[in-house]
Amino acid sequence: MSIIDSLLAFTFAATLLTLTPGLDTALILRTAAVEGRKEAFKAQMGINTGCLIWGAMVAFGLGALVAVSELAYSILKYCGAAYLCWLGIMMLLRPRGSLAGAERLETKAQNGFIRGMFGNVLNPKVGIFYVSFLPQFIPHGQPLIAWTFGLVFIHLLLGTCWSIALISATRPLSAFLRREKVIRWMDRCTGMVFLLFATRLALSKR
């Protein structure tokens, strides 16, 4: 896969994943509706910071694994493929009917930035997702750490743009994204994408 193809494929996949309603979306919507736009923007900056922290851990840890051991790389690859496959199957067979769980994001912290950051940093699924997802879009022979951070920044840019849209149109988008049919449809679409990426990752070569 060429560099342009990798960037286009990742941008498409990350856009779909960003638009799929999840806990980050729920946090932004709730914060904007209840605490105002300022706190919602703080929450988004916190989410970005959490993703950057995980991105750094993945970039340096993954780089060390790839450099040291072919076996470690293969284990990482197949574990990532299995994780994506499991997520995809669960989303296809058991799509959510609501954004239940958003309330669990509420902590004693009153600052939106803190809530957003710890909502990601304390969620190991974010790290596992980065490990299993990002390597598929790094062209062979390219610097792993630089590319990992580059892809993370694309993800952050997409997430920020989506959050700005959510914050700017909180009421109509909130009602739309909380519809049971919309959540189920987005979950199933994302599940199919996960299964395709799991197959691609399992069949890929170093």
Image: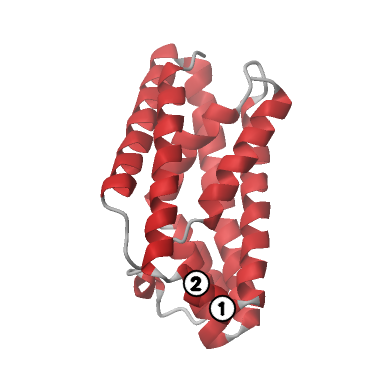
> Does dot 2 land on a helix, a strand or a loop?
helix
Q: Looking at the picture, does residue 184 appear above or below residue 44?
A: above
Front-lying residue, 149 or 87 = 87
Residue 72 shows in this picture: yes
Residue furthest front in the image: 181
Residue drawn 44% across the image and 42% down it: 129
Give the Cα separation between the discs numbered 1 and 2. Answer: 6 Å
Q: Quadrant of residue 56?
A: top right
Residue 53 shows in this picture: no
The reply to whether the C-beta atoms of the residues labelled 1 and 2 are less than 8 Å apart is yes
Total number of numbered discs in the rendering: 2
Image location of residue 84, percent across then percent down? 38, 36
Crowd class of label 1 (few under 14; some 14 to 19; many from 20; radius 10 Å): few
Tag on residue 176?
2
Q: Looking at the picture, does residue 34 appear above or below residue 72?
A: below
Residue drawn 49% across the image and 78% down it: 30
Residue type at tag 1 = Pro
Image location of residue 76, percent across then percent down? 40, 26
Residue drawn 40% across the image and 52% down it: 187
- What residue sits right under mark 1 in the picture? 172
